[in-house]
Image (cartoon, grey):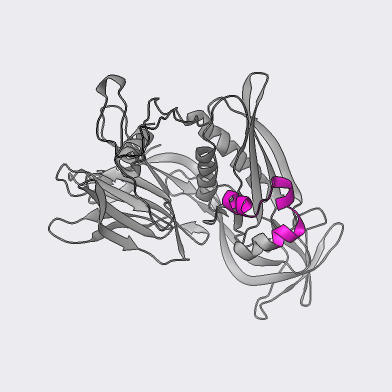
Amino acid sequence: MQKLNHKVFGLIIFAALLLVITNPRPSPAQSDATLDRIVSQIESLYPPLEGYVIAVEGNGLTLDLKRGMPVKKGDRLKLIRYGRDLFHPVTKKKVGRKETDLGEVEILEVRKDFSHARSLNPTALPKEGDGVRSPFQKLSFLVAPPNIKSRKKLDADRLRLNLEKKLNQHPRFEVPAFDLGLWMADEKLSETSALKPKNLRRLKRKVDADLILFPQVRTIKGKMALSYKLVSAKDGSLQKQARVLSDDLPARQARRERGSGPQTSFEAKKKSFKFIGKELFPYEIVDFDVGDLNGDGKKEYVLIDHYRVMVFKLKKGKLRKIGQMKMRKGFDQFLGVDVGDINGNGRDEIFVTNKKGDKLESFALERQPGKKGFKQVWKNANLYFRIIRPFGAKPILLSQSPGFQYAFQGPIKRVLFKSRRYIQGPK
């Protein structure tokens, strides 16, 4: 919550919308839990596939994958040789088994109780007990504008953005920068007509997506219910539909207009803010945070898109870029950014959660005194980052490891700065 308040304060100045905010922003805890549950439900539809080699006959393999499992002729799976068990040196708990990649196998036929396959690596010598596993599969989602059927005034745009952000945070999911609602409006399409084959083909020419999520909010017996339909972007077939109760979906902020001229005054009695302009950016903003990067007591604004970290200062009511660091477009995918002084030197560091392929390569940046640009003070961290700010206390950096089958694995741990390096501490 403290993290949210910190960003909302930055958003007030950064977004500079021509509106008046008169109500406090609702707590996102319950709505976050609702969206997490939806993402988990979707994740369960597309589990990674694993199996074993149960027989070897020349170049042919028999696998324990059968009809009804997410496998078909032509699929390629990784071939793995399992080794000894691996144990954690401190806890002594088993963490897995040693694995050696032997290449790929191709599914030739799927039968009732098993599958036939062949090894694509002529130098590999598969044997019974070797494993097969589906490669890292990334799914692309489009989120339609929520259909609000409730008397309660809800912020449909915020709900859609929250859904997109939750999906983007999953290592196997992504949401392309494409406004499905705008496209449907331009083409004069409804939810039903958009799923007709000819319109799906037109959509395919605009954006490459696997699935479309259609959210809907309605009141059921006095309670708010967020339901959704997940359909294939290829043929419009229904993949899943479900309903989740939630009483804390994002409410529409009360606003009023004061003519077309610039806003110039503040009304202290009503504790409301008025803004004087707005900023437009020619790229998608994934996340942002606010912090004192130079240690001079002045705030900088840190924005990220999918592969760039950009730093701005507010000068004469305008945001001016003062620094940028970029990674490789198409290879790196930034998921989130957090700013805070974790090493205690008086200058806030920038912590970026970065996904590369099927793992995380997160990193931290810091401004060096008297120098331009930023220095990487931590890199290649296979961790999710999040900074929280307890009341009256210093910021705390939390971390969690990614999983293979699920987005997260293991406990959430605090990150400490000791002996001039960042280390994971206790839970």
**Res 264 quadrant in image:** top left
The quarter in which the N terminus is drawn is top left
- Depth check: 148 or 37 in front? 148
**Residue displayed at 33% across by 48% down:** 423
**Residue displayed at 22% across by 61% down:** 373
**Residue displayed at 60% across by 24% down:** 151
Could you tell me if residue 133 is visible in this image? no
- Depth check: 350 or 421 in front? 350
Q: Position of residue 339 (x, y in %)?
A: 30, 45
Q: Main secondary structure of the magenta part?
A: helix
Q: How many marks?
A: 0
**Residue displayed at 30% across by 27% down:** 391
Q: Is residue 417 above or below residue 30?
A: below
> What stretch of residues is rendered in magenta?
180-201
> Is 182 inside the magenta-drawn segment?
yes
> Is 249 inside the magenta-drawn segment?
no
Q: Position of residue 236 (x, y in %)?
A: 74, 53
The quarter in which the C terminus is drawn is top left
Q: Is residue 319 left or right of residue 235?
A: left
**Res 34 quadrant in image:** top right
Q: Position of residue 5 (x, y in %)?
A: 35, 33
In the picture as drawn, the residue positioned furthest to the bottom comes out as 122
